[in-house]
Structures are given as C-alpha cells and as structure tokens.
Amino acid sequence: MKIIQMVDSLNIGGTERMVVNISNLLATKGITVYLIVTRGDSSLKEFIAENVNVVCINKRHSFDIVAFMRLVRIVKNNKIDIIHAHSSSVVWAVLVKTIFKRISIIWHDHLGRRSDMKFSNKFLALISGFFDAVITVNENLRDWSITNLRVPPGRIFYLKNFYGRTNEIETKREVDHTLTILSLANLRWQKDQITLIRAISILVKDYGTRNFKVQLVGNLLDKPYYQKVIDETIELQLQEFVEFVGSVPNPSEYLLSADIGVLSSVSEGLPLSILEYGYHGLAVVATDVGQCSEVLGYGKYGKIVPPSSPRELAAAIHNLLVNPIERISLGFEYKEHIEKEYSEDTFWVSYFEILEVIDLSHKSFRV
C-alpha cells in the first residue's frame, strides 16, 4: 500500500506535528509513505523518519500548474493508492482524483472553529463528494461533517491525536528552583495568550505569588497579535515573569523543565500540546474547548476552566503552584492516562479500520 500524507507546510504547529507523527507511524507498519509538502519545508523535516519519502513541490500560488504537475507525476510514477490530505491541501487532492479516478482521498480536518468559516465551508461541501473518508480531531467537527458534507456518516471518524516520540531530547536543561509555567502554543488569537497574561497579573497582584516564571513557546508569525501580547505584558508590568521563547523545533527541553502546562485557547480541535504536557508528566490547566475536557478526564487528570476567564485561570494555576503534592500526583496520573489512551498503537487501530472501510484492498490502481 502506498499513501501520500499531504500538507501545505511543515511550519511548527500542531497540525504539522501530527502529519509528521502519522507519516512516521505508517512507515513503521510497512506502508510506503510519501510526505508531500506543497508550499515548502521547515525545521520539522529533521524529525521525519528516514523511511518516509519527503517531497516539496514548491507551490507558489493556488493555480501553480508546474507544482501541480509535479504532484501528478508523483502519484502516477509511484502508483499511489490513497492521498491523506490535511486541512486545505485537500483541494489539490481532489484535483488529482479527477485525473486518477480510482485513487482514494482521506480528508483530515484539524480546524477547531470550522463552523465559523462560512465561505470555505460551502466550497468544502461542494467538493466533499470526492472524499472517501473524513477524519476529525474532535467530536464537534465530526458532527459538523456529518451534517454538512456529502460523505456517508459511516465514513466520518473522530480520531484522537497522539504524541509522537521521534527525536526527543532526553535530558533536562539546568533550571533554578523557580516554578515554570509553560504555554506551548503559537502566538495567535485562538490561543488567547492575552487571557493567560491577565491571569499572571492576578497571581502576582492579588495572590502575591512571585516564585514562578511563564515561558511562551510558539511561533511569533502573527506580528499584530504578538505585539498585543507584548503590550499587555508591559502594561501589567510582568516583564520579569514572562519569557517570549519563540518557535523551537523540538519543545521537549522546555517540557522536561516545566512544572505546569497551560492552554488558554478560545478554540481548539484536539491540541497536540496538551498531549505533550501529559507525556512529560506535567500538571495541566486548560480551557474547556475542543476535546480538552475529554483528554483531561473531565477534571480527573487536570484543571479545566472556562475560556476567556483570567480569574478562574489564575485560581487554577495558583492551586497547583501552592500544592506540590497535588501537582506532582496529577502529572503522574495524567502521564499514565496519555500513554494508555493517546498512544501510537491506539491511533493505528482506528486508522487501520478506516483503511478497511474504504476497502483499498479491492481497488486496483488505474492511470
């Protein structure tokens, strides 16, 4: 079996990390995997297993015929059985299927706020008749797909993201005794670091808590929003508590040195960062968006707070800062939970069922 994993870029983010995770996993199962990057690669490339074939087709714009023909040649020359297209890359997957009609398409939707994207949703509904299966990263997206797409409900699946262990850093950095709160998320409005900064202000000014630091790890490409977070930090006089780390290819060194993981988002699917927190044994505070509550066992394995609520976020963080036994215990139990329920093996069982549903074994490749 030959499968293309297709994504627009390998910029550092949750979607892109999952594409790498899936590609590496499928390669270990004896599947020939081609990871097609349409718009260019990045530092995530170093985390891709050697037996995954990585190709960048250098797409410059939506109607780049030269890049599209590169994709067509890859499909034809390698007799590809299936294109697993992530997010907006599915548009070109559909165009490929108009040429190679027996190829199968799996569309993987990672966008938590899908229902707000009115124009693109109408277009998705229009082309969804070409999809053989749909994977969503939370249950709300699955429900939306069942209602809005021209795909039978039995071919629409909610699959849990999983944590990939490729090229981890195994040793902790040297750290002082200051407790570290880690926010592993790209700086953009959906991640709502503004609420986190306001919660930190409450910790300092209302609770009198000072023996901690916050590390914001994620890309800073949304310059206007990044500036808003900086302005908020300066206005609230929190410069000594907040560190803007920026984008890092492998966040393990920060995960291994942190004490608490925080997710302050107003919108999510199933964020990979919350799984990374668990795998590294961190106590977690997360907003009740996407599948976060489910991942945290509805409060059994971490603190859940409403989105856009700095005071409740501050109270939950403070509780973990001043209760080391609970903090360590939650982190330990959460790690066991993640390793059991959000593992590569769990994902593979569900993914293999999808391959059976679309019945690839009875499809012969035609050019």
Image: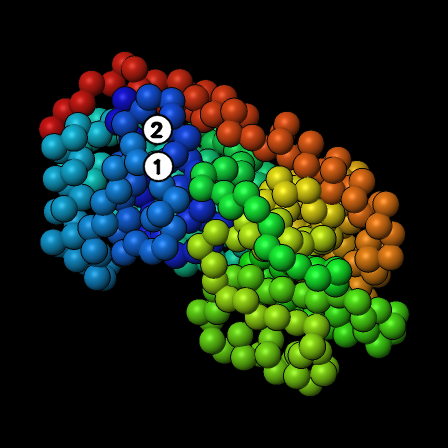
Question: Which residue sits at x=43%, y=21%?
Answer: 352
**Residue at the image position 34 percent from the left and 48 percent from the top:** 45
As measured in the structure, the alpha-carbon distance from the residue carrying label 1 to the one carrying label 2 is: 8 Å
> Given this view, does label 1 or label 2 mark the residue nearer the observer?
1
* 318 vs 364, nearest the viewer: 318
Position of residue 101 relative to residue 248, above or below, is: above
Q: Position of residue 365 (x, y in %)?
A: 18, 23
Image x and y of residue 354, in percent: 43, 24
Q: Residues within 10 Å of mark 2 (few under 14, many from 20)?
A: some
Give the quadrant of residue 320: bottom right
Q: Left or right: 256 with respect to 60? A: right
Q: Quadrant of the N terminus?
A: top left
Pick out the residue farthest to the front.
Answer: 174
Residue picked out by circle 2: 27
Q: Residue furthest top?
A: 362
**In contact (CB < 8 Å): disc 1 and disc 2:** yes
Name the residue carrying label 1.
49
Residue 217 horizontal/vertical position (percent) = 56, 62
Q: In terms of secondary structure, where does tag 1 sit?
A: loop
Is residue 132 visible from the viewing direction of this image? yes
Q: Which quarter of the rendering shows the C terminus? A: top left
What residue is drawn where x is 25% and y is 37%? 53
Residue placed most toward the observer, 343 or 157:
343
Q: x and y percent of residue 76 in the render?
A: 13, 33
Q: Give left or right: position of 40 versus 353.
A: left
Residue at the spot 23% in from the left edge and 45% down from the top edge: 55
Answer yes or no: is residue 199 visible: no
Residue 232 drawn above or below residue 263: below
Q: Residue 219 or 354: which is nearer the viewer? A: 219
**Relative depth, front residue between 255 and 68:** 255
Q: Amino acid at mark 2?
A: Ala
* Three-letter amino acid code of the residue under disc 1: Ala
